[in-house]
Amino acid sequence: MRVSRLYTALPLAQGDTIDLDDDSGHYLRTVLRLKKADELILFNGDGGEYLARVEEVGRKAVAVAIGVRQERSVESPLQVNLGLGIARGDRMDWSVQKAVELGVNRITPLMTERCVVQFKGEKKPQRLLHWQKIVQHAAEQSGRTVVPALTEIAPLASWVGQQQGLRVFLDPYAQTSLAQLQPEAMQVTLLTGPEGGFSAQEREIAQAAGFIPVRLGSRILRTETASLTALAAVQMLWGDFK
């Protein structure tokens, strides 16, 4: 029987009993439907995980006893940073979720010229919190013990100048393929656009910052397909899909 995994931001130590925060307690109680004495695995992103047992499940509190720590890593040797042009609704959610499953280390949602999504008032922090929960749940499901970083929404023009390692952006009209490149210090930064792709000016800005345009085959891919295809490709070429 598969043991459920649950992320918590709380410190974890063998022998302690902790009360989960409201969100984690709600998830354990209503989604995982665990009961007293059920076993689970807890992790907080420090690279290990803990065997645990449910001690109490109540409306106001969910208590968990922490057991033995297990050292286990499923992280790729390739460090992947993803700049993700913000797409609408489910497309963005899907891209974030699957990027975590494919081993990304950092995700930055990017505002680009052709983004159709606009954030007003409290919409930006709400959307970031929504994506953060997707990141955490994807880490739980995929067995990762490190939770990828989700950074603040940034303008593409300022973000590109801060990146390091092999820097590429996806362009269906480019002449270079990923297989023709080699990462520096096992670090790759991928830049993918929104539904409408990049403008000519954004292509120039990215290239001036050291980004190389690359193609992914001869077909034009939708935004959510392109980012995931690129992640799978770099893991196959240089990561842990070998």
Image: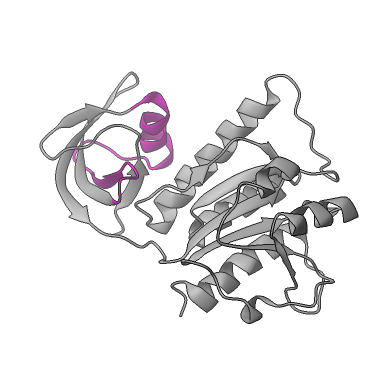
Q: Nearer the viewer, residue 120 or 51?
A: 120
Q: Nearer the viewer, residue 121 or 212?
A: 212
* Residue bounds of the magenta highlight: 21-47
- 196 in relation to 176, above or below: above
Q: Where does the image place residue 46, in percent across and percent down from the top left?
A: 30, 45
Q: Residue at x 10, y 36 (%)?
A: 15
Left or right for 92, reference 74: right
> How many numbered discs?
0
Residue 43 picture quarter: top left
Q: Nearer the viewer, residue 86 or 170?
A: 170
Residue positioned most to the right: 200
Q: Nearer the viewer, residue 25 or 148?
A: 148
- 47 in relation to 124, above or below: below
Quadrant in which the N terminus is drawn: bottom left
Magenta segment includes 19 = no
Q: Residue at x 25, y 33 (%)?
A: 11
Q: Residue at x 62, y 76 (%)?
A: 181
Q: Residue at x 75, y 78 (%)?
A: 217
Q: Where does the image place residue 119, in percent across and percent down from the top left?
A: 75, 29
Q: How is the image coloured?
A: one colour
- 4 in relation to 65, above or below: below
